Every structure is written in C-alpha cells, then in structure tokens.
Image (tube, rainbow, N blue to C red):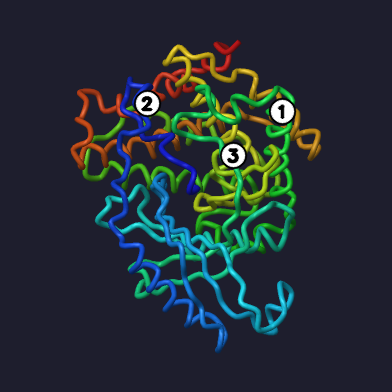
Amino acid sequence: MSTAETASSEAPAGDADNFAEVARPSGSQRDTAELGRELQAWLETRLHEGANPQVTDVRLPGANGMSSETILFDAVWTESTEDALFSEPGTRRTHELVARVEPGATTMPIFPSYDMGTQFAVMKRVGELSDVPVPTAYWSESDPAALGAPFFVMERIEGEVPPDVMPYNFGSSWLFDATDAQRRSLQDASVEVLATLHRIENPVQHFDFLQLPDGGPTAEQAFRAHLARQRGYYNWAAAAGPRSPLIERSLDWLEANVPADDSPAVLCWGDSRIGNIMYRDFAPVAVLDWEMAALGPREMDLAWMIFLHRFFEDLAGLANLDGMPDFLRRADVEARYRDLTGHESTNIEFYALYAALRHATIMFRIQCRAIAFGQAELPADPDDMILHRPTLEAMLDGTYWAGLS
C-alpha cells in the first residue's frame, strides 16, 4: 500500500463515519535522526567509492500503510561516470527516495510474510518490460542489520493519490471535485494501466518467481493455486482468534465454482486500485504497491478495481452520501478494457466475489489486530468484523449486481 494509502479496510463494523481511525497502527517510534545515520551508512556500502553520500530530510509519513513502513528521505552523493546519464561525473546531485521496510512481527502484521525482495523484483521487471509508470527501483536489502528489517529503496515521485481517509467519493477530495471529463480521463487511464500490464509477453517466464508450486500456465490453473493460498491465509489470520462462517462459506463456494479458462495467465498487479496510483493532471505517473502481484486471470485485476470502488460506494450509502455512482462502473471498466485489448472479460461477478472475499479476510485480520490492541471489542457475531458483510452476502447470494442502479 502506498504512502498516501490509509485504512480502506480498517473500519469498525457498522460505523462508516469513524471507520478511518480504527486499527490504525501507532506512529513509528523511530528517531528520524538515527534513521538518517543508518541510511547514510548503508548507502556508503552500496555506492561507488568517493560517492560520499549524505542523507537529509528524513520523515515518516503520518499515513503509513499496514503492509510496510515507509521512510521518505533525500540523499546527496557525488556522481560517477556510470551516472553521467543524469549529470557530469563529479557532480553532487540530490536524489529523492523512498524506503519501504518490512514490518516487525511484534506489530501483529496483517500478512504472514513480507517478501520485500519479490516486490522489488516485480517493480523492476515491470519497468523494464512495459510502459507502466513505476518508480525506478534502486536497491533491495535482505539483511536486516541496516534498519532492523529487510527493505528496498525506490525513486520518490510527486503526485496526487485519491484519498482513502476520508474516501475520495465522500466529497471534498480533488477527485470528487473534478469535472466529469477529468474523472473519465483518470478512469480510462487507470484501466489502461491494467491493459498495458497484461500485455507483457511470456509472464510465466519473466515472473517465474511468482508461480505457485501447485499453479500452472493457464489462467484457471494459476487461479486455483491462488485460491488455495487464500484459504491458507485465512486459516493463518484466524488461527489465534474467532473464525468467520461467511468467509468460510465464500471460500467453499468459490472453490466449487471456479470458471474454466484455458487462456494464458497474465501478470496481475494484485492491488489494482486507484488509491495505489499517483496522478498528475489526472494521468498516472506512478503505479505503486506490488506486494499482491501474482500470475492469474486478467479478471482478477479488473474485478479488484471495480470492487474497491464499489466498497467505497457502499460506505457512502451507509453514510447517506451521494458518492460517485458514475465512476468506475463495471460496464464502463469492461468496455474500456475491451477497447484497449480486444479481450471480452468473463465471469466478472465471480472474480468480484473473490475480491470481496480477499478484502474481507484482510479486514478480518485487521479487526483481530484492533481487538488485540484494545481498539475494538470482539462482537457476538464474528462476521460483523467485516464492514462490507452485506455486500459479500449479496454477492454470494447472487443479488448484489441486480440491486445496483
């Protein structure tokens, strides 16, 4: 999740007005001056002799996400002949950087593991193999000695991100206040990000490290492995606390109804939502947060983008707000993707249910975390820990999409 990302899934059940503040991690206790010294010492091991790096302006964003810790900093060093593309050798140049650091186990992390090296590798290869705008990936560090946990460093890019708190469709956001034409431009460009990503040729070869042991080259084979891993994640998330009958019923239904699909698996971004894109003039300038990247059917990405907006729209309805009902509509997203790729998306309702199930499982874990930290109480019905419970139930019953205007 991006530095501008916050708590789309951190809500107490039934309280849309205050959902943004529940289960937020406490602010980092790191000392920025000490962090600067640690980063500077580490850079000295990574840069050429004579670079003489100096780290300045270290800061910790108040909206840190839950999938990693974010550190923003500037670093000045003397360019070498290898850097002559940017400036004359011997020039001292400032680099605006971001470090993404694996969360510590004591924070009761949301996911069982955080492979920062894999995220780094995905981002780097996407940048090499496509026109998807990803930040330059500089270094990956697996040794926790430098900052206390593995991390990677990437380019820092300036832009606007649709806010999660309060959600962009609740009013008073730059996206909400935009014109219809501007919102449509952003929507079309965001779908184009998916189309461009899915055009990467031979993804199983280029991203073989993402292939699950029980997966295969087809979309169906890859998805079945993905779904099995999702059940494993749920079992891990619920191991020390309550279990969710709704999540378990959804998993059972999905496993029994996997669509046949012998088309090739594509590289899926995974967390394909507009809250993970930085925009400038309503055009994407940075696609962020690749920890959910996977090989699978392209509908996984399309459905996630559609569902995450629907999640916010359903919240707006709970809060008696108008929302943005004409934005990221399912039919419009599918049509734009078809125009760009020639691919007629199928079984979107199935994959939207899968998206809702994945989001529910993450939310369930976050609420378990909130309960453990004394920020929430365990409800009598564990399914009430899922804020979009009515949405998931309606999708499972086959009534959700027919109920939309």
Q: Secondary structure at mark 3?
A: helix
Q: How far apart are the two marked residues, 2 and 3, measured between alpha carbons?
A: 21 Å
Label placed on residue 184:
1
Residue 96 rendering spot, x and y as whole percentages: 56, 62
* Front residue of this view, candidates 325 and 263: 325
Q: How far apart are the two marked residues, 1 and 3, measured between alpha carbons?
A: 22 Å
- The amino acid on which the numbered mark 1 sits, given as a three-letter code, is Arg
For image coordinates 52% across by 17% down, the residue present is: 400
Task: Please name the residue that numbered disc 3 is placed on.
Answer: 300
- The amino acid on which the numbered mark 2 sits, given as a three-letter code, is Leu
- The amino acid on which the numbered mark 3 sits, given as a three-letter code, is Met
Relative side of 355 to 132, left or right: left
Relative side of 325 to 197, left or right: left
Residue extending furthest toward the bottom: 49
**Image quadrant of residue 273?**
top right
Relative side of 221 to 372, left or right: right
Count of picture labels: 3
- Quadrant housing the C terminus: top right
Q: Is residue 284 above or below residue 45?
A: above
Label placed on residue 387:
2
Q: Secondary structure at mark 2?
A: loop
Residue 82 rendering spot, x and y as whole percentages: 69, 81
Which one is earlier in the sequence, the residue at label 2 or at label 3? 3
Which one is earlier in the sequence, the residue at label 1 or at label 2? 1
Q: Is residue 286 above or below residue 315?
A: below
* Front residue of this view, candidates 45 and 254: 45
